[in-house]
Image (tube, coloured by chain):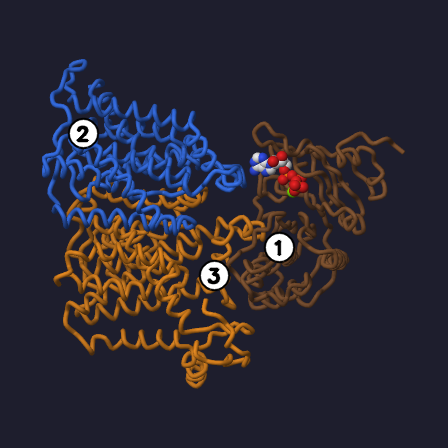
Chain colours: A brown, B orange, C blue
Amino acid sequence: MASFFEVENLTKRFGGLVAVDNVSFRIERDEIVGLIGPNGSGKTTLVRCIIGILSPTSGTVKFKGQDITRWRPWKVVQAGLAGTFQVVKPFRRLPVIANVMVGCLCPRVTRRGEWVKSTQIKARDALEFVGIMDRALEPASNLSHGDLKRLEVARAIATEPELLILDEPFGGLNPAETELVAKSMKRLHKGGRFGRLHSEGPAMLIIEHKLSELMKIVDKVIVLNYGKIIAYGTPEEIIRDPQVIEAYTGKEVPVA
Amino acid sequence: MLKRRLNDFRWGVLPVPGRLMAVIFFVFLFVFPLISDARYPLLIVTLACIYAIFAVSWDLLSGYTGQVNFGHALFFGVGAYGSALLYKYLGLPPWATIPLGALIAALAGVVTCLPALRLRGPYLSLLTLAFPLLLSQVARAFPEVTGGYIGIRGLPALAASPIGRYYVCLIVMIVSVLIMWKLTDAGSKNVRTGLIFHAIREDEITARATGINTIRYKILAFAIGGFFGGIAGGLFGHLLRTVGLGVFAISLSFQAIIWVVFGGIVSIYGPVIGVFVLYPLVELMQGTAIGEYRNLIMAVIVILILCFMPEGIAVRIRDKIERQCPRCKLSNAAWRRECRACSASLRHVADG
Amino acid sequence: MIVPIIIRTLTLGGVYALLASGMSLIFGVAHIVNLAHTAFFMVGAYGMWFLMRQQGWGPIESILVTVVGVTLLGLLVYRVFLNRVRQHPQAILLITIAFALVFQELLVLAFGSHFRTAPALIQGSRLILGVRVTNQDLLALGVVAVVMIVMWLVLKKTKLGIAIRATANDAEIANLMGISVPRTLLITMGIGTALAGVAAVLMAPLWVFYPYIWMSPLTMILAIVVLGGLGSIKGSVIGAFIIALVETLVVFLLPQHGYMTTAFALLAMIIVLSVRPGGLFGTIFEEERL
Ligand SMILES: Nc1ncnc2c1ncn2[C@@H]1O[C@H](COP(=O)(O)OP(=O)(O)OP(=O)(O)O)[C@@H](O)[C@H]1O
Ligand SMILES: [Mg+2]
């Protein structure tokens, strides 16, 4: 049986540099998967290839049985796969709420008989969900880095994805805020309605350096190093994997 | 119905100085022929109406979506030549040739857009700069069709009298500007293009990753910009009853940008004010002692505005006389102490 | 027919190369598309004409004053105006066009719209492969070659060149490395306009000047710079000779359609851009699909 989401032999070269090297993995409909790896290991590049911002050198990406490799980003989003940026790219001069409303305009969402009129309410609910409703009417350029990260998440969930890819969602957040966002991700994953905001209960792929927080919410972890997958397994397996420890500390660690 | 409109006026227009001024401005335009029906001033204001459509169409395309077009005269020229050729070969009347010519201009917009889709920033601007130049030389190379250097003459007039022509242009201008205003209104409850155009300008990649088919909307923006640019061109041709290569001039492309920047980019009302202030002013200078210096004065105005008031005159004035309520974002007169709707205090809202 | 085509391509390409590389340098380093570039060139040519014909100065002092004058003018415009709006590419385009118009109008007011030509710096002409070429043309070609080599050496070998290239690459990092970015930008602007001044000195006796002359070479230079890749000097030089060849071919093969030169140059540019969105030698960082 075909998986819900499947990446096969994905490779991305930048000139001589192989940023993503023959990567294959799967995500099931009900999973939250973590993607970790040292800086520069190709995580962001992998995500950008999946959501169609970059075109991969070779390999395929399959989503819900369709081959979505090299699809344009909006088609990918309309199919139900949304991602956030590690380096935040909001619509700076637009109000925060308008940033999210753009996501609500996605045909995937409005096709269900909802019309532009209701987008504003829905955008509010998305902002409420990530906890920055009080900044809704300010231009996005006024927000702090952590709030911008949350805005990214709100923008992505406004498109009601079935697979949500988050690139360092906790970056710039303090421990309390991290806790909050992690909890709301869990809630989102369960699915249901949050006001007008509808959640499909998306599968998730979360890239994060804050391992302790990440490990609490994920079912599986993929470890990337120099563009290659070096380990895959449950959080418990991963934190004991000698290869992973080596990749992170940069030296041989005696296996205990 | 009437009562509702009156209520709108009482609560929506009167308390907001900017809107009140807009209403006064349009009323003034409607009664202008009563004040002065001399030919020359009327012609100037008629041309200002045409140029206002042209400038606003540039603002829609380049201001809103950020696809900075340096060859907007292409659309003006295609609209003008298109309607002139439709008359010359098919003998159609102006009310048919102008919209059809504008449709051809919209098509020209789509065609220019195709190579432009892959380009950004200065590359896009410089590429678009090339198109009207190219087309004017092509038009010159086929004198049997286009009349070559002389152009096409003897087009039918828009209306019999100068006043009639004035009202045609005025009404077309108002309708066109209202349509473009609606299309670009980001807060609109039933048109989504405004918000999407803003998003594309702010960050195209993010817009894509948010599910917006940016290619489709960029083509749409080029088509709309081309269409209204073409309307302006068609009106122009039939007003002067002749179309020559001048409609493709680089100076016309830049003139549009100058009007928009002067009035205020990304605002729709800015370009209208820019045209209605600058164009008659420059025309008035002609024939006076400073007539010789008018191009110089224009250029200096542009430099000074760009350096010291980049948001444009009209937008600057509006910011001076209106304040947005920090709570409900409703516009209020700057001298009010509290919001007219939610009575939040306005006193601490700083200037700009 | 081949020989005159080659000779005209070389002489025309030389001037274009000087102008285009100056413009490209300014864009590459300061991200300024200087649409007033050929207007500076025009001002320089008027300077030569004014000093030599009106004031009766000798060639050496005229050349010096012209080149220095044009450079100072460029620096002034940059420091006082361009610098303020450097972050807004559209504002830059507009403001530089406005400056071109200012120069144009001032020249009209000062000297009228008559045609002007400066006296030749060296007299005479000679036969090359059966074609008569003026010595001034040969001098121009020689100077262009020398200037290009000097510029190449400066950019590759000197400290200043390294600073310029580092700033072009990434101004922020250059700043962190202790390079004074504002100073480098100013110097680059100076070099760019000085090149326009040199081109003016060389062409003042060869072309006929009037206050609107900046427009037609401007479209050609733009076509060259865009075709070669904005910011790439190598691209500009190669593009200059390509466009010069196109222009010469149009003039020789379609004599009755001489006005089509711009159309063909722009067509060449559009074709190159459609195939390579960054021009021949332009590098666009593979950020995202377009
Ligand atoms: N557009 C690009 N062109 C060339 N090289 C690139 C580009 N984008 C990324 N790279 C290179 O690809 C490699 C992988 O980068 P990537 O950003 O994917 O790493 P990452 O795992 O996301 O790192 P981090 O944890 O710091 O976010 C790096 O060596 C980077 O320099
Ligand atoms: Mg990353």
Q: Quadrant of ligand 2?
A: top right
Q: Looking at numbered disc 2 in the image, what kind of residue is underneath it?
A: Ile
Q: Which of the two residues, B227 or C205, is positioned nearer the viewer here? A: C205
Q: Which residue is mark 3?
A: B194
Q: CA distance from mark 3 to mark 2?
A: 60 Å
**Badges 3 and 1: C-beta atoms under 8 Å apart?**
no
Single out the residue that lies furthest toward the right. Answer: A256
Name the residue that disc number 1 marks: A145
Q: Residue at x 62, y 32 (%)?
A: A58
What's the residue at 44%, 36% (across, down)?
C278
Are marks 3 and 1 in one subunit?
no
Same subunit, labels 2 and 1: the answer reads no
User: At label 3, which amino acid type do we have?
Assistant: Gly
Can you give x and y, in whole percent of width and height, for residue A67 in the image? 65, 40
Q: Which amino acid, mark 1? A: His
**C10, C263: nearer the viewer:** C10
Which x, y percent locates residue A25? 74, 38
Q: Which residue is mark 2?
A: C60
Label 3 vs label 2, nearer the camera: 2
Left or right of B96 in this view: B185? right
The C terminus of chain A is located in which quarter?
top right
* Quadrant of residue B335 within the rendered picture: bottom left
Q: Residues within 10 Å of mark 1 (few under 14, many from 20)?
A: some
Question: Which class describes the residues within 10 Å of circle 2: few (<14), some (14-19), or many (20+)?
Answer: few
Q: Work out whether disc 3 and disc 2 sit on a shared chain.
A: no
Give the number of the disc on residue A67: none
Tell which tag, 3 or 1, sits nearer the viewer: 1
